[in-house]
Image: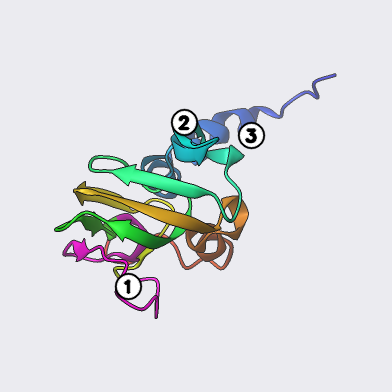
Amino acid sequence: GPQPCPAWLCCLLPCLRNSRENRLWSEAVPEDGEVLRGGRWVRMDSHSFVPGDVIRVKAGFRSPADLRVVQAAEGCQADKRLTLGATEPVLVSSSTPPSSAASGSVLLLGDLVVGGECVGVATATGNDCFIARAVKHKAWPPKAL
């Protein structure tokens, strides 16, 4: 059954949950996203995605996984402020080589599409995503935030 909680820990837990990092994490990580299943787009819980899934991200939504962009509407842009601390939106394009996480052909878990829409193939999900690895190495959130 439940273990008794020391009073000092019970007082501290709400502070930990409301830390700056936890608030930013909650803002960055979407609960769900659109994935191609059985030839149609289905909205699913983000934790259900696996590498290789084909995922669509529309304007106003955050990427639910790390993606290699394979198709992007003309003028599609992504805000990478929460993931990389970027101050300007990045033009999303499938024609840019995926040389780095800042590349326009890569969407990271938590990147916000601010214009247009794009489709990508999941390269990493869950704890394997760039942002989760950065948290593990105490390299997130970006210093610019």
**Mark 1 vs mark 3: which is more N-terminal?**
3
Q: Which residue is drawn at 18% across and 61% down?
A: 89
Q: What element carries label 2?
A: strand
On the image, numbered disc 1 is attached to which residue? Answer: 103
* Disc 2 target residue: 42
Q: In this view, does 66 lie above or below 112?
A: below
**Placement of 47 over or under 124, stated as above or below:** above
| Image position of 6 (left or right of 122) | right
Task: Give yes or no for contact between labels 2 and 3 (Cβ–Cβ under 8 Å).
Answer: no
Identity, as a three-letter code, of the amino acid under mark 1: Ser
Numbered disc 3: secondary structure: helix
Which amino acid, mark 3? Leu
Q: Residue drawn at (33%, 72%), measured in percent from left and top?
A: 102
Q: Label 1 vs label 3: CA separation?
A: 43 Å
**Which range is magenta?**
82-103
Q: Inspect the image, locate mark 2, and give the three-letter code of the amino acid beneath it.
A: Val
Mark 3 = which residue? Answer: 9
- Mark nearer the N terminus (2 vs 3): 3
Q: Marks 2 and 3, how far apart in space?
A: 41 Å
The answer to whether residue 93 is seen in the rendering is yes
Q: Give the total of numbered labels.
A: 3
In the visual, does 106 lie left or right of 134?
left
Q: Which of 60 and 71 is in front in this view?
A: 71
